[in-house]
Amino acid sequence: MSRQSSRIGDSKKVNGELFTLTYGALVAQLIKDYENDEQVNKQLDRMGYNMGVRLIEDFLARFNIGRCSDFRETADIIAKHAFKTYLGLTPVISNWSPAGDEFSLMLETNPLTEFVELPPGHSNLNYSNLLCGVLRGALEMVQMDVDVRFVQDALKGDNVTEIRLKFIKKLEDAVPAGED
Amino acid sequence: MSRQSSRIGDSKKVNGELFTLTYGALVAQLIKDYENDEQVNKQLDRMGYNMGVRLIEDFLARFNIGRCSDFRETADIIAKHAFKTYLGLTPVISNWSPAGDEFSLMLETNPLTEFVELPPGHSNLNYSNLLCGVLRGALEMVQMDVDVRFVQDALKGDNVTEIRLKFIKKLEDAVPAGED
């Protein structure tokens, strides 16, 4: 689906349960379509990427955010502005690497998984992998190549949900606007 | 995806653009998966049905709504409570049939389609058909067999988006809890 123009400063909200069920329908469909969990994870990441490259435009306009001075500032903006705006929650930033190039977002709740149970036989499924793709896509649009992945997931019985972000490299200003 | 328990009185919201893009990813995936628009429409209706049978429980608890005395009261509750709660808008109720068994919901805006363009060659796609399924599923859970379908869609160039609801019959109290 393509988009005609960008939205700025809009703050429309929809009900969280409707979103959770819609996302669940998407994941269920991908489970039907693909042979294994790894392929579903990849597909969710790809879809998220395409969403991230669109959402970032709206996000930057909304908060009038300039270039981050370092990865710590990026972490702050992701946790306190991006997650807050789009999902209504603020993850805790933790587990910084000594070099300052890796951190984790700890989610106590996750609107994508509320009242969800993983179907049997899908222990490798990263149910919320869309979020990794969104972050990866959005960060790429601000010239940051970042590896984003789940390292813990409360849906799989972990105590907390942890998304790990590792800064790879700064990209040149001209980057492709999407991937299919 | 199954659900462990029901949510009552919760009012978490997520960003509308995130929802629009997630729904767009779902429709795009179905377009890939199915041969023609009619099959995609049917699939969206089926997914919506399964969502409706879940959402109704939360909805009834939230507003403490009892049995409607007639279809006009049902129309009012759908427009003023259900659409308002889940999508943040209130459609206009119009075009009542003389017998009072049919009406239309006129949507001036539709969060599912904001900034969406139908891909070429999909003139029979009812992009937002999920909504028909949600209404059908939710109404079935309150013992009403209702036919729900799009008759106009702004996405296809119509001036307004119109969903038509036609009361078919009252169901017995014991109804199946889902369809797959």
Image (cartoon, coloured by chain):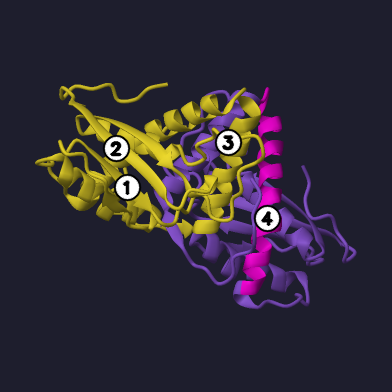
Chain colours: A yellow, B purple
Can I make out residue B102 in this image?
no
Q: CA distance from mark 4 to mark 3?
A: 28 Å
User: Disc 4 sits on a residue from what chain?
Assistant: B
**What residue is rendered at 60% in x and 28% in y?**
B31
Q: Are marks 1 and 2 in contact (CB under 8 Å)?
A: yes
Is disc 4 placed on a helix, strand or loop? helix
Q: Are marks 3 and 1 on the same chain?
A: yes
Q: Are marks 2 and 4 on the same chain?
A: no
For the record, the magenta segment spans B34-61
Judging by the rendered image, the residue that carries numbered circle 1 is A105
Q: Amino acid at mark 3?
A: Ser
Which of the two marks, 2 or 4, is nearer to us in this view?
Answer: 2
Q: Position of residue B61 (x, y in %)?
A: 64, 73
Q: Amino acid at mark 4?
A: Gly
Q: Which mark is residue A123?
A: 3
Q: Is residue B30 left or right of residue B53?
A: left
Toward the viewer: B82 or B177? Answer: B177
Is B118 colored magenta in this rendering? no
In the figure, B151 relative to A16: above or below? above
Q: Amino acid at mark 2?
A: Leu
Q: CA distance from mark 2 to mark 3?
A: 22 Å
**What residue is rendered at 69% in x and 37% in y?**
B43
**What residue is rendered at 28% in x and 21% in y?**
A176
User: Mark 3 or mark 1: which comes first in sequence?
Assistant: 1
> Dot 4: within a 10 Å radius of its alpha carbon, few (fewer than 14), some, or many (20 or more) residues?
many
> Dot 2: within a 10 Å radius of its alpha carbon, few (fewer than 14), some, or many (20 or more) residues?
many
> Dot 1: within a 10 Å radius of its alpha carbon, few (fewer than 14), some, or many (20 or more) residues?
many
Which of the two marks, 1 or 4, is nearer to us in this view?
Answer: 1
Judging by the rendered image, the residue that carries numbered circle 4 is B52
Judging by the rendered image, the residue that carries numbered circle 2 is A165
